[in-house]
Amino acid sequence: MATIEKDPVLVVVQLTGGNDYLNTVIPYNNGLYRDNRKAVSIGDNQIVHLDQTYGFPSFLAPMKQFWDEGKLAIMHGVGYLDSPRSHFRSMDIWHTCEADKVGTEGWLGRVVREFDPKKDNVVTAVSFGPCLFRALSMPGVPVACVAGPLETYGFLPGIQDRAQRQAVLDRFSRMYTPIPGSGVLEYLGTTGLDSLKGADILKVAPGRYKSDAKYPDTPIGRKLKGIAQVHFADLGTRVFYCDHGSFDTHAGQNPIHASLWSDLNKALEVFMADLRAHARSDNVIVLVFSEFGRRVRDNGSGTDHGAAGVTFVLGEKVKGGHYGDMPSLEASKLVQGDLNPNMDFRGIYSTILERWMHLDPVPIVNGKYEQPAFLN
Amino acid sequence: MAHRDDIALMAHLMRRAGFGASRDELEARVANGYEATVEELLHPETQPPVDPYVLLRYQPSALLPGGVPPMGNVNYMYYLVTTQRPLEEKMALFWHHVFATGNSKVDNYDQLLEQIDLFREQGMGNYRDLLMTVAKNPSMLFWLDNNQNHGTEVNENWGRELLELFSLGAGNYTETDVREASRAFTGWTFATKIPRLPYGRFPWKFEYCSEDHDDGQKTFLGHAGNFNGEDIIDIIVQQPACARFICRHLYNFYVADEPQVPAWSLEPPRDPAAIDMLAATFQANKCEMKPVLRTLFTSDFFKNARYQHLKSPAEVVVGTLRLMGGYEIPRPGCGELSMQPSYMGQDLLNPPSVEGWHTGQEWINSGSLMSRINFVAEQVGNTNLPGVQAIVRRLQAMGVLEPEQMVDSCLDLLGPVEVGPDTKKVLTEQAKQWGQIRWDTPAQIEASTKQTGELLQLIVATREYQFA
């Protein structure tokens, strides 16, 4: 495609475990916040005000910069109807957009299939994490999964002789010819061949990456660096995915929550600066989500599983601001002690799909949802 | 000589009820008989336990906290690779999958190893007793925050996962039951955690604080009373859903891959009759695990499920190391080996969440497939390892081998592994480039040994080899 404009890219950061919404975007004037958060709250002197209503804890300071620049959209009260309090069901629902049955197709797997139905590019989606997230999983859709360093990614690196290695890899590729209808064997065949191709393509990325950016030596820092390396290499990757956690702060929440956000913020700050310094930020947005928020009332040292949460979208083309309102903290408005979601996460996906990726969101998120207008 | 089918069936039993076995061991077990082998596996006390002092003698650091690779992994891998009680160890791994407790939070490998020990001791005993011990296990109490579950401030973490993941499965209780169960476990905690530095951890001990227990009336699954945690467990194990849930776990782990646990309330079992049979045994024997395992391993559905299970990373690594041999004594480098399952997506003692690992097809993605193939290939390609040499000796005893015979024999000695015709064609092509395999001169022996290693490498890279 001969256009000067670069294809839009989506980076997803998954906050695994259920991020505490109330201590991330704090309704600092709301007396009910203090009433419910006797032990697990952010002190007034630790809150950076965004406006008359909301503040960030100081460990989100870099995010405040993006907010001031008008490049951070805050989506309030995100969730879905009848939220189960289970991490796994909830994460599955976010991943598959299927609230009533266990889905096997991830929403981003569908996106990759739309972009690349003929599988011309096996690195259309690249995941940095321990496993293939269900959001990316889709039969027949390749996703490169990088668990360790990008530099040593490939099959049978032990065979030194190039010709011999090539011969063995040729045999390997023939042994993995997918047999249609053979179920798991077919899946293995496709995965084997795709990873063979993916490794060949991705191995160029670290070499092409020239940057002085100093990423923090943390898991999330290494993942975002990997994403930058592949993004800079112009391999046609449209979807990047990584995870960060665990945000399951039932106990001892204050220090854990602070260090998790601080690690993420430091890494994101370097990542965005790296992209900007190399004029590669214009076609990137970053979606930061968690499977649910946490209970309004703390349990003395942490918070239990809740319902509505907060979702962020960050990027040069994002229209910063608040979208929706924080659900009421009034006891009568809570559902089993939790904030009642008033924005469906599938609406956020729909905005991204329609206005950023230029895809029809309906078949991807399984329906029509109101779209918060955080993108032009 | 043992019949080929008997060897194949015994190899299947040993892959599932253990971590595989060498050809010598398989032949000895076939001579004893299948039922006798099942009985031996069910009675681990007839075999010697792992000697932890051997580990300490060679790796004194294996009991020191912290470190890279972590001492927890080194210890656990030593037990997995050297045990002579395969089913006891496999059941411990099974319960580790179910009661998934992770060092990411517990940050105390001593205590996690102690939890694995309790799975070894009670894993084949009574499930009710096991559940009771787990409910009092300090790692579990801390992992699911029951030490923060107070009479005045209920923390639902343990109460919820007990029902959702450890006993009944979603759909078999209400939110009220979660709340009430959590109330019943208030006051179940452990003696104060002492900071790790500078003297290392003090062992954690279960503690019941009656003053922190909610003494009020509770209603749980239709029963009412002033329940404590024990009562909740007694009510749980009476539920037919409990028998079915645990048996489905067993089926998924030992027989054939099921969908992931969150799907179980929505999707019927792969083999409903098998679950019925196992659950009936479980209930008739009042939660005793041994009769259930006996039913399972002697059933036709088990015997017919060969290669219906995608090996977990632990099965890949442990199975390979046991077959290759030479790891009985913890040599330098055993620490790095203990990290291998984590590179394939299964960090032992540190599951990604309380749900445990997603199994079956979900073990495989482009990154993990690469890690597992690369690891196994490196091992079987090392012709200095006793396991490879044992295969070479058996091949040598067969004399001159045509390419087809070479492929068949290597497949047989590595499993037997069953491969499809297309895979066999590629393997045979590889063997044909060498022509006849001969063992007459030292030069021929050297070349043939090297070629054996190369063929084994290609075999373990096949799709078929990823199944057990």
Image: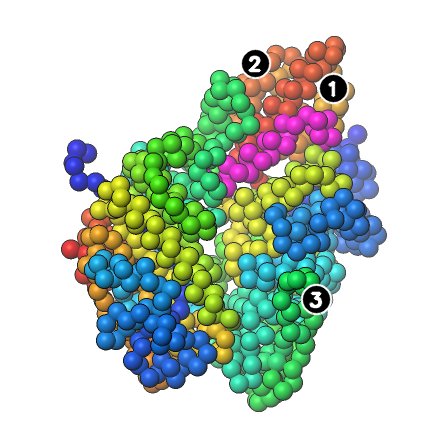
The lab-note entry on whether marks 3 and 2 share a chain reads: yes
Q: Residue at x 53, y 38 (%)?
A: B371
**Which residues lie in the magenta part?**
B366-389
The residue that disc 2 covers is: B433
Subunit that carries the residue with mark 2: B
Left or right of residue A317, residue A133 in this image: right
Subunit that carries the residue with mark 1: B
In space, the residues marked 3 and 2 are separated at their CA atoms by: 60 Å
Please state which amino acid type lies under the numbered disc 3: Pro
Question: Does B367 lie within the magenta span?
Answer: yes
Image quarter in which the C terminus of chain A is found:
bottom left
SS category of the residue bearing label 2: loop
The residue that disc 3 covers is: B203
Q: Main secondary structure of the magenta part?
A: helix
* Residue B137 drawn at (x, y percent): 66, 68
Of badges 3 and 1, the one in the foreground is: 3
Q: Are marks 3 and 2 in contact (CB under 8 Å)?
A: no
Say few, some or many: other residues with alpha carbon within 10 Å of mark 2 (under 14 / 14 to 19 / 20 or more).
few
Subunit that carries the residue with mark 3: B
Quarter of the rendering containing residue A6: top left
The residue that disc 1 covers is: B396
- Judge by depth and name the residue closer to the eye, A35 or B435: A35
Of badges 3 and 2, the one in the foreground is: 3
- Judge by depth and name the residue closer to the eye, B11 or A196: A196
Which label's residue is closer to the chain start, 3 or 1? 3
Say few, some or many: other residues with alpha carbon within 10 Å of mark 3 (under 14 / 14 to 19 / 20 or more).
some
Question: Does A330 lie within the magenta span?
Answer: no
**Above or below — where is B95 with respect to B404?**
below
- Judge by depth and name the residue closer to the eye, B259 or B79: B79
Which label's residue is closer to the chain start, 3 or 2? 3
Please state which amino acid type lies under the numbered disc 2: Gln
In space, the residues marked 3 and 1 are separated at their CA atoms by: 54 Å
